[in-house]
Amino acid sequence: MVLLVLDIALTIVFTLLEAKEYVEEVKPYDIERPGKLTSEGEASGTLFGLDLTSYFTLNHDYYYRCKRDEHHYAIRKASPNRDFNPAAYKELSSDSEREYERFEVQKAQGNKKLLDQLFVNPRFTNREVFNTIFMIDKEAFNGTKGMSGGLRMPPNLNYINDYAFTDSDIDSMDFTGGDKIAIIGSAAFSGTKLRTIDLSEHYGLSSVGRNCFSNNPYLSTVKLPGTVIALGIDAFDNTSALKAVEIGWGDRWQLEAVEYNLSDSYPSSSVQRLFKGKDLVIPSGSFEQYYRHSLNGKYMGGNFMIAENHPVLTVVEAGNSGIFYLTKDEVAKGAIDSEETDEETRKILKVLQFLLLTIY
């Protein structure tokens, strides 16, 4: 009996010592499978007019394995019935921080489904929710109307999944409100009314899906960072108002990598029409890299032989031949403009062109 009591006492002592020395392990949401929901560790509900999923964040301690005090949200859809509430979203994204009580929100919404602590803390603020939205789910706003006037982007948004805004009437989204977008899925903004998409400061952006910005007659500005290594086919298809695309690739190896990634899945003819009919605005000082990669002045169908890309040199076409030269010399420019066809003269001009590229 004494031994049994001693054994129990020692067990308690060692348990307490082990618990005291236990180091809390924090595991965030599953970033390896951002578009795939799992049954473990999730809770859903409606807040600020949005149907949200709170992804599991494990705060392990010895006594309570799944204590949660931090939430990471994904927008699953615009409310359970897909009606967008602009006033509620404005309240969510407001700079003015306001505190809420879970029970009062539950009561005001009249939801049958309980908003438990696995979904939201007993007391929370609009900024806490807005700043922890990391994903917009697949088809979240697909076909949603009433979005005219635009959205303020959550500052820590990482993922915009396939068809997230397809055929919605959204006409404005301030992408400069954050800089953490990593993946944009297929046709995510296809068929919208967005006029400007500036992703140039999102230096973690690596993948843009096929048809991403397509079928938008209003789109006039697109800016992409140099970190994109996968750009989907027909991303700019049917965008008549988009005359130029600003791209951030500055090295020849980047140009080759993007082209290779596309060629791995699509025929060359499809790859070479990606920027068809568009001018390409490239990083300052990168003209030589582009020219050495594509002597015809085209990169995947887009024209980088524009004055904005090389202010020192003048781009001149030899008559209607489709042959382009770079010159800073007015005499040489005049010779080219005269539709010179003499082969020896052409050779001289090519040498001049090479020297100019070397000097400038």
Image (spheres, rainbow, N blue to C red):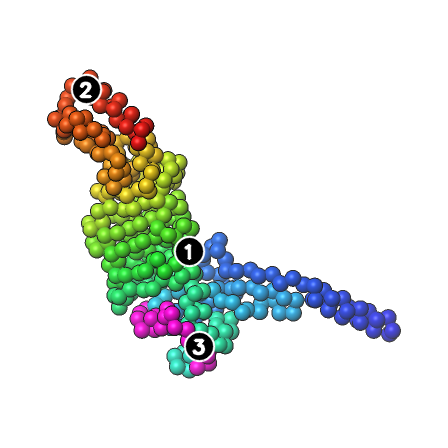
Would you identify the image quadrant in which residue 97 lies?
Answer: bottom left
- Residue, x 24% and y 46% (percent of image)? 244
What are the residue bounds of the magenta stretch?
A: 81-104
x, y percent for residue 18: 72, 64
x, y percent for residue 89: 34, 70
Amino acid identity at mark 2: Thr
- Residue 349 vs residue 132, the one in the foreground: 349
Q: Residues within 10 Å of mark 3 (few under 14, many from 20)?
A: few
Amino acid identity at mark 3: Glu
Give me the C-alpha separation between circle 1 and circle 3: 26 Å
- Residue 242 vs residue 183, the one in the foreground: 242
- Residue, x 40% and y 46% (percent of image)? 227
Mark 3 or 2, which is nearer the eye?
A: 2
- Residue, x 44% and y 73% (percent of image)? 125
Mark 1 or 2, which is nearer the eye?
A: 2
Badge 1 is on which residue?
Answer: 180
Give me the C-alpha separation between circle 1 and circle 2: 53 Å
Badge 2 is on which residue?
Answer: 345
x, y percent for residue 90: 33, 71
Is residue 230 within the magenta segment? no
Amino acid identity at mark 1: Lys
Badge 3 is on which residue?
Answer: 99
Mark 1 and mark 3 in contact? Answer it, CB < 8 Å.
no
Is residue 100 within the magenta segment? yes
